[in-house]
Image: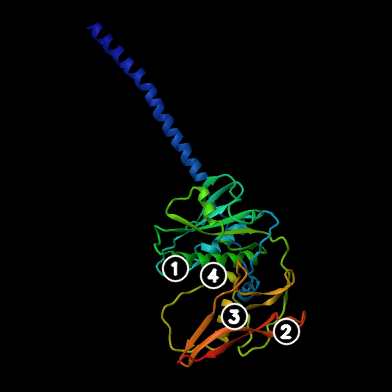
Amino acid sequence: MRKIIFGFIICIMLVFVAVLPVIGEFQKIESENTVKNIKINFHRISLPPPMFIDMILEESICRRMSVRSYTGEDVTDEELSTILWAAYGVTENGNRSIFNPDETFSTIIYVIRSDATYKYVPEDHSLSLFKNGNYLHLGQYDDAPIKFGLVWDMDIESEELRGMADIGMICQNIYFDANALDLATITTGMYVEELNELGIPSNEKPEIIMPLGHPSNPYDFTYDPLPNSNLPPVEDNTITLEDAINNRSIVNTWDDSPLSLLEQSQLMWSSYGYSYLWDNVNNKRHRTLPSGIGYYPFKIFAADSNGVYQYFYNTDIPDSRQGLNLEFCFHFQYNSYN
């Protein structure tokens, strides 16, 4: 009997010795997973709250411009937070800062910095680590300390034009807040395929790269009213850029009240007109819509019950400073189509 008990104890000890390394391995794996989870959470960086920008909307429209040279000075986290929120964030009323009729927001913003590349997470206004390493060489303008890689997620939105509509709105909002913070940017479509070096998924297509930084030449504007035309002069409102983003409303039904001529003037001017600020650095008057390529091939037409009108500028008014045709007069020209 004693031999049987002794043999049983020996068997138990042998089993325990055999299982002990396995138990240790389980503990090791569990410990490693815990560390990994901590590491993942650590690389989800919460951004500071966006700064309030009290610049009036019309002034920010006038200041928007493309910049191609940067100092290399760092962009603060507060500045980055403000620009990302305006570009693609969640507003005070729970909407997004851009409009999508189906709420199929198919853009992913990759934030490329010298230490690593992150993905912007609009839902909780944070950055999620995507890849370590410095990839600021991707695209153009390597002197910028940050680059935004805007890609279209084909799994979310199958139509590229609809995806690009979102990206267009994002780009304009980046222009707005960057310039209002005395930072600078430009939209670039060349070499965007280099974003694939990051190892982005195959369902994502690179579309735009936007550098962000401090302009090599600080902004210097002088108020210079637009010349008279057959449209009412531009008027500044009291709404700030931040209020405009937060309170933007989208409708798809209208009443039959006609727009006033001033309202028509403001809408056309803000979409494709010229700034009432003179740029003393580049010695020119900018368009209200910045262009990364420096030319404007589009035309705007408006139609009502009386006919079709074209919005355009008249280059026949000479500039008082240089005797050149650089001052522009905007108006509607009626075109009759039979």
Q: Secondary structure at mark 2?
A: loop
- Camera-side mark, 3 or 2: 2
* Crowding at mark 3 (Cα within 10 Å: few <14, some 14-19, many 20+): many
Q: Horizontal placement of 137 versus 7: left or right?
A: right
Rendered position, 149 above or below 283: above
Residue position marked by numbered label 1 in the rendering: 100
- Camera-side mark, 2 or 1: 2
Disc 1 residue type? Answer: Asn
Which disc is residue 245 wearing?
Answer: 4
Disc 4 residue type? Answer: Ile
- How many angstroms separate mark 1 from mark 3 (CA)? 24 Å
Residue ID at (54%, 79%): 299
- How many angstroms separate mark 1 from mark 4 (CA)? 14 Å
Residue position marked by numbered label 3 in the rendering: 269
Rendered position, 298 above or below 314: above
| For marks 3 and 2 on the same chain, the one whose residue lies earlier in the sequence | 3
| For marks 1 and 4 on the same chain, the one whose residue lies earlier in the sequence | 1
- Camera-side mark, 3 or 4: 3
